[in-house]
């Protein structure tokens, strides 16, 4: 793979010097060229991800679909989400607004004596091998993803944002990026903090993120695919994850309209098996959110309406809680 790494570095350098660096100087951001160079790398990774999706996953959807896609408009919105995330538009906003906050937070943690734990130094001669450390980081971040995902379904305020992701009635490979921006922000904040605390090298962090995202694209694909009785317990399949999006299974506990669900694993089903949230049923159920399907609750048709309605759901929850907590006025 050395030739690929060298080619990637060459293209990244060329794109940065010819396009990104002049723009940064023009915007007065010359002091942050290192971050701009890293951002150029993320852009190239996103382009490669889109290529893999179109060349490998899209044919699978055509070959063996779960259902016929009839709501093309909803899929186009999901494509917009994917372009925003994979081509770096979301990261660009974070670069100019929240990255300085992240940096200050990390400095504050260092000042509190919270040091970095370099996982690839735990077993000299073994964990310092690139492929071994990469596997370790994949497992660690997958455990973090499981915890985040459980939180998104367990805390009502978080579910009010995350429900947007489940509101797609016809899943495709584009569905993975269909998230509320605040939901994405919270997840990315946790990922950045964990990355700082365990000392993952930048190159391996990019690899972990890119590989995880591509696997999630396959899991959301409209493809009738599972990995067999053994394989299903080793890696999350499209069938396993579709159950997570199924009405009455994925986002509810025991078929009741209460927060919970099954199949939260992102890469590995091990965590679901360990914590009793796995469902290996061999079926492909309709997807969506119960109140959307049964009561016609609107989750929005376009990007901005979906983002706005997510904020309204969150605001309504806080308003309800503040109203309940207000003391009753005396009638004396």
Image: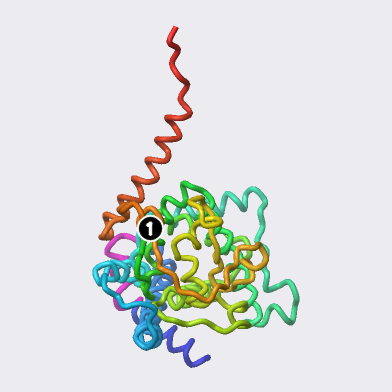
User: Which residue is pictured at 62% across the width and 79% down the height?
Assistant: 234
User: Which residue is pictured at 43% across the width and 56% down the height?
Assistant: 162
Magenta highlight on residue 22: yes
User: Which residue is pictured at 52% across the width and 91% down the height?
Assistant: 1
In the picture, the quarter occupied by the C terminus is top left
Q: Quick one: which residue is furthest to the top in this view? A: 332
Residue 13 appears anywhere in the view = no
Front residue of 143 and 329:
329
Residue range of the region highlighted in magenta in the rendering: 16-29
State how many labels appear.
1
Instruction: Establish if 320 lies above or below 61.
Output: above
Residue 169, how many percent across, how many down?
A: 35, 66
- Callout 1: 10 Å neighbours few (<14), some, many (20+)? many
Residue 156, how many percent across, how many down?
A: 48, 47
Q: How is the image coloured?
A: rainbow
Residue 204, how many percent across, how many down?
A: 55, 75
Residue 139 appears anywhere in the view = yes
Mark 1 secondary-structure assignment: helix
Instruction: Establish if 30 lies above or below 332.
Output: below
Instruction: Establish if 176 lies above or below 154.
Output: below
Magenta highlight on residue 23: yes
User: Which residue is pictured at 60% across the width and 67% down the height?
Assistant: 278
Front residue of 258 and 308:
258
- Residue that carries the numbered disc 1 in the rendered image: 164
Magenta stretch: helix, strand or loop mostly: helix
Front residue of 245 and 203:
245
Could you tell whether 3 is left or right of 133 in the image?
left
Front residue of 6 and 233:
233
Residue 229, how many percent across, how many down?
A: 61, 82
């Amino acid at each position: 793979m050395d030739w690929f790494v060298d080619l990637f570095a060459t293209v990244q350098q060329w794109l940065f010097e010819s396009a990104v660096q002049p723009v940064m100087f023009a915007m007065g951001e010359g002091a942050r060229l290192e971050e701009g160079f890293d951002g150029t790398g993320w852009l190239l990774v996103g382009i490669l991800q889109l290529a893999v999706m179109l060349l490998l996953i899209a044919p699978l959807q055509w070959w063996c679909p779960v259902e016929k896609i009839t709501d093309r408009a909803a899929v186009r919105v999901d494509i917009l989400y994917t372009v925003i995330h994979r081509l770096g538009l979301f990261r660009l906003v974070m670069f100019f607004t929240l990255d300085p906050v992240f940096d200050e937070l990390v400095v504050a943690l260092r000042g509190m004596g919270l040091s970095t734990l370099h996982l690839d130094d735990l077993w000299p001669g073994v964990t310092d091998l690139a492929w071994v450390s990469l596997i370790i980081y994949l497992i660690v971040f997958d455990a973090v993803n499981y915890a985040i995902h459980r939180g998104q379904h367990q805390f009502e305020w978080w579910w009010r944002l995350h429900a947007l992701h489940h509101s797609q009635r016809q899943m495709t490979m584009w569905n993975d990026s269909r998230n509320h921006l605040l939901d994405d922000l919270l997840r990315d904040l946790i990922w950045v903090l964990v990355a700082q605390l365990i000392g993952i090298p930048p190159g391996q962090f990019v690899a972990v993120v890119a590989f995880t995202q591509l696997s999630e694209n396959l899991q959301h694909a409209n493809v009738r695919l599972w990995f067999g009785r053994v394989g299903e317990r080793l890696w999350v399949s499209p069938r396993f994850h579709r159950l997570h999006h199924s009405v009455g299974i994925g986002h509810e506990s025991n078929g009741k309209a209460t927060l919970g669900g099954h199949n939260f694993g992102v890469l590995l089903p091990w965590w679901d098996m360990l914590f009793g949230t796995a469902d290996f049923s061999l079926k492909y159920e309709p997807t969506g959110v119960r109140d959307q399907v049964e009561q016609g609750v609107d989750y929005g048709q376009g990007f901005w309406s979906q983002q706005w309605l997510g904020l309204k759901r969150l605001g309504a929850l806080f308003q309800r809680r503040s109203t309940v907590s207000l003391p009753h006025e005396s009638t004396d």
